[in-house]
Amino acid sequence: MSSGTGRADWVRWLGALVPLSRRTQLVGHSIAAAVILEATAEVAADQAPRLTLVSPFFLQPPAGLANRFWPLTAAYLRSTDTSTLATRLTGDPADGSLLASAVEDLRRPHTATRAARLLALAARPRWHEHLRRLLRRYPGEVHLIVGEHDPLSAETSSLTVAARRSTRVIPGAGHHPQLTHPAEVAKALDHGPLARG
């Protein structure tokens, strides 16, 4: 994880890495879903890439208050083990082996602190509202992928029925379907209702 974690950094990096066009598909999970939405907010309709947002936190019920206190979260992340983290992220401690590299990364200097600060940012209601506004006015196609056990909130369902929007629910999955159900997520990416031929 790089030290640059501000929204301005995200917009600049994505613009430098990916040429945006209607033929582009951008996929982001959770906070990365917010990154690609922020980075494409000002794009013209004829250049708007297709966005696939996996478990977009800003369309889901808000996180607990503990996430807003980043020093406590950082301490938890630094000391967690694979089965505990898996239980928290996927709902199943048996998924621990899938998170071994993530736990190793959290032991690196400053990584847990950066992750905790991002979680605190993601817990801010004002950012949720900002991102929902961006989604409402986004001129391109948007495909949402969520786990059955990590659903969209009822209050955001109106955002998913507009034109150029679709939602795919992965049965049995939680917040990290790309880890626990990779084949189903890959199929949703390749054969989603909005997939281009």
Image: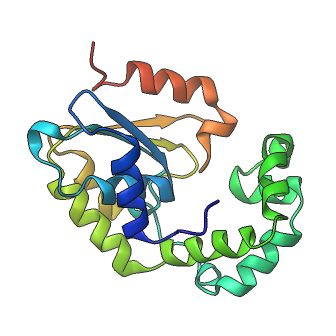
Where on the picture, by quarter, is residue 173? top right
Look at the image and tell me in which quarter the C terminus lies. Answer: top left
Report x, y in % for residue 180: 69, 37
Position of 25 relative to 63 (above/below): above
Report x, y in % for residue 5: 52, 69
Where on the picture, by quarter, is residue 134? bottom left
Look at the image and tell me in which quarter the N terminus lies. Answer: bottom right
- Residue at left offset 78%, top offset 52%: 86
Where on the picture, by quarter, is residue 19? top left
The answer to whether residue 171 is visible is yes
Position of 189 relative to 179 (above/below): above
Report x, y in % for residue 101: 81, 47
Position of 43 relative to 57 (above/below): above
The answer to whether residue 153 is visible is no
Q: How many marks?
A: 0
- Residue at left offset 81%, top offset 42%: 95
Q: 38 and 126: which one is in front?
A: 38
